[in-house]
Amino acid sequence: MFKRFVIFFLIITSLNSYAQFDSTKIASRVSSDLKLSYNSAMKYPGARVGLEMPIRLVQKTKIKNSGYQKIIYKSMFISGNLSWYHHTSYHDNIYFTVETGLRRTQKSGFFFDFSTGWGYSRTFIGATTYTADDNGNVSIKRFAGYNYAIFIISDGVCYDFSKTTTKPFSIFSKISILTMYPYNSSFYLRPTIEFGIIYYPSEFIVVKPKTKSIVKYK
């Protein structure tokens, strides 16, 4: 699956290398972002797709007496994410989360983000499951599994190509912790690792976030 993801990433890169993306200004209306990643729970493979909608954008510019400018981009966003991973010989876990994130981007393109959110998880047992009634009749239970409420917290490091080139995407890596409840009447922690891309389409679910530009002289 990871090899397929890499091939898909290369195709997206080549198709959008000609796109124009102006990151030097804060627009009053911006497009939402699309996210695709390889999502691994420990050694178990999976995938994740998501939509990010910015709700606040801030550009901070520090100008020194020498004329040197340091620009930092800060953003707050909400995202909806559909994730899946396959736990060999145990279950498949499909979960949906709504998250709020903070992102800090350098002019060079490197950025860090942090997000938290809540969601719903449904697991599907990876083996034939049987049920028996009071009369001893046995039957196969299809789509056997469990429902969980989940809390997720994530921290990531990324590189935004649109800050230094005309390519409208970022690549990122992220570590997350899933907290699932109830799991045997307690909480269950599951770490996950992501590697993926965030694509910035020019017109897709356009929103109007709060914007602010700050200039400081030192």
Image (cartoon, helix red, strand yellow):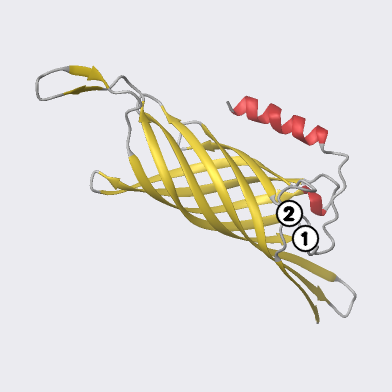
Crowding near the residue tagged with mark 1, few <14, some 14–19, many ≥20 C-alpha atoms within 10 Å: some
Q: In which quarter of the image is the N terminus?
A: top right
Q: In the rendered view, would you say 178 is above or below 7?
A: below
Give the residue pinned by disc 1: 29
Q: Do the residues labelled 2 and 1 touch (CB within 8 Å)?
A: yes
Instruction: Work out which residue is located at the far left of the displayed protein and give it.
Output: 135
Which numbered tag is attached to residue 91?
A: none
Secondary element type, mark 2: loop
Question: To which quarter of the image does residue 78 belong?
Answer: bottom right
Residue at image coords 64%, 25%? 4
Which numbered tag is attached to residue 206?
A: 2
Image coordinates of residue 175 in percent, x first then y, are 52, 48
Q: In which quarter of the image is the C terminus?
A: bottom right
Image coordinates of residue 179 in percent, x first then y, are 38, 50
**Amino acid tagged 1:** Arg
Question: To which quarter of the image does residue 87 belong?
Answer: top left
Residue at image coords 79%, 60%? 107
**Residue 194 appears left or right of 148:** right
Image coordinates of residue 120 in percent, x first then y, are 42, 46
**Amino acid tagged 2:** Val
Q: In the rendered view, would you say 78 is above or below 196?
A: below
Real-space Cα distance between discs 2 and 1? 6 Å
Residue at image coords 39%, 38%? 122
Image coordinates of residue 46 in percent, x first then y, are 51, 33
Instruction: Work out which residue is located at the far front of the displayed protein and give it.
Output: 135
Residue at image coords 36%, 26%? 143
Q: Nearer the viewer, residue 133 or 171?
A: 133
**Residue 26 appears left or right of 57:** right
